Image (cartoon, rainbow, N blue to C red):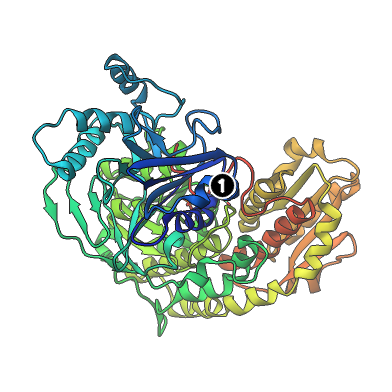
Amino acid sequence: MCGIVGYIGSQKASPILLAGLTKLEYRGYDSAGIAIIEDGKIDVQKDQGRVSNLYKIKEIENLNGTIGIAHTRWATHGTPSKENAHPQTSNNGDFAVVHNGIIENYVELRKELEEKGYKFFSSTDTEVIPNLIDYFYKNDNKNQKELKFVNAVKNATDKLVGSFAIEVLSKENPDNMIVVRKDSPLVIGKGYGENYIASDIPAILSYTKDFYLLENLEFALLSRDNIRFFDKNLKEFNKKSDTITWNAMAADKNGYEDYMLKEIYEQPTAIRETIGTRVNTGICKFDELNFTKEYLQNLKQIYIVACGTAMHAGLAVKSTIERFSKIRTEVDIASEFRYRDPLIDDKTLCIFISQSGETADTIAALKLSKEKGAKTLAISNVIGSSITREADYSIYTHAGPEIAVASTKAYTSQITLLTLLAIYLGQVLGNVKEQEVSKLVNEMLELPIKVEEVLKTTEKVKKIAKKLYQEKDVFYLGRGVDYTTAEEASLKLKEISYIHSEGYPAGELKHGTIALIEKGVNVIGIMTNKNLVKKTISNMEEIITRGAVTTAVLSESIYKDINTTIFDNLIIVPDTDESLSSIVTIVPLQLLAYYIAKEKGLDVDKPRNLAKSVTVE
Ligand code: M6R
């Protein structure tokens, strides 16, 4: 949930650390800090609030040290404050640590350390770590300094229960830094005579393209020219680096006012790249999956499990998967699924969707499914992310880095990939007619152009946003897949504009919620399905009678077919196959949420109380 950066080399560390933190601010932004080794001591500077506050600290500007660690925080234990900001240090200032994750047994560890004479100055779970390292370091008389350092970090992490990605500086080891992770991401960027650390690749992508993706409980001892890797028993091993193909531009705003807007506009490319070369002469290829017809025929059910927008992507493809595979498919929220003892076994295929691949509840749900004997398939946007390392199989969306907290291009790419997966399942099972597949595949290939067309409605959407931005409540209605779009559109509005909203099944309104509709309440009706449109129009008429102000989102052919004068505002999207309609329909509604938030003068990329990846449950 927080962001980590580290640098060891020959350049002044502080500008590199601050630039990295700025790129990672979407992971957490209630306090930030850095620690740099200079003149034989560790200098820690930190403050409450955003990373920009660190730029105002004179002492940071004057620090010339070439080794340092840094952190931007999203508070879990202890309020956002200077004391609780990272780095946290050992009592004697010999060790400084930044930490992502949660130490579940920190209360017990704190007590143990207090009995040994250590004092605590913050309410964080993290502060136990530098003090534990200090304790083990002081009590090691056998080893020389460098090995003592590695041993102390290992002994300390052996005591930790929970999740962590940790960077450690040691005063007595001014030319080394140690990093280790468990269930929280951390990567090492390899340079020439310098090395970089980050919790997320975009933070250091402008310096290197060669990365080591640390696995759980692997330790790395970094110096300027070398990186030594140790396993959990401190046995040294060689590790292969990976080369990342994104460029730094892709992770930058590239001229857009906000990342969210840039990412909305990147959707045609993200969809195109996600389809990639998977479709060839009507066949959907998933070489990474070796599902046999026999295995699929034996399946009783498919579960799709995820959180937030990723869960909505699951809902959007549920019927497509059922249509092609003829296997009962359920969609569940990861935080519910993991605690309700779901009925799954080796005749269940569990699919986990996570843009970041780091969402704690989704990872826990995946582990549970594995324990119960199900095969697990991860769908992520981040190569090497935790979820993909846990799953039996992984397939990737190719949306490029998604930085804004509100997920946009990941959603449409997930639906794209899952639709291809649905076709693939149908093809392996021999369930699908060639004609049906080629019709849908052709529609998919046209999606990028259709989304580009939708993006041209921006000016119209902006005008609607100007009318809506002062509202207190907005309702989104739809039937079938339009209901899923309603839920996703509502989530977008809530999280970035702080306007209360609900995505509701149009037919369910009169079973209670219609009581909330009175003169002036804004309702957005989504209507893209010819078979259901009449029903939804009746529901819209019921609320128009009660004085609601309405916006209709209509597919082109429906627009031509119905009387649209009853609606106050109209948004028209191109026709497409029903399985794909969420993709074209959500785009103007993402834009609507965006422009409403802009009208309100809000920070679109970093909405209050939220962080990009939710690595705590
Ligand atoms: O990284 P993930 O896809 O696992 O994230 C899941 C949700 O936390 C995420 O989609 C969240 O709902 C977004 N803020 C929605 O815009």
Which quadrant of the view contains residue 509?
top right
Whether residue 136 is situated above or below residue 215 in the rendered picture = above
Residue 364 in view: no
Task: Report whether 96 appears left or right of 46.
Answer: left
Which percent across, then down, holds residue 6?
A: 38, 52
Which percent across, then down, holds residue 610?
A: 58, 43
Residue at image point 86% right, 66% down: 563
Residue 511 in view: yes
Whether residue 13 is situated above or below residue 208 in the rendered picture = above
Task: Report whether 354 appears left or right of 594.
Answer: left
Which quadrant of the view contains residue 40?
top left
Query: Residue most toward the top?
Result: 115
| Residue nearer the viewer, 160 or 369 | 160
| Residue nearer the viewer, 105 or 562 | 105
Residue at image point 17% right, 39% down: 148
- The residue indicated by pointer 1 is 58
- How many neighbours does mark 1 have within 10 angstroms: few (below 14), some (14-19), or many (20 or more)? few
Which percent across, then down, holds residue 260?
A: 62, 60
The secondary element bearing badge 1 is classed as helix
Task: Report whether 35 appears left or right of 413.
Answer: left
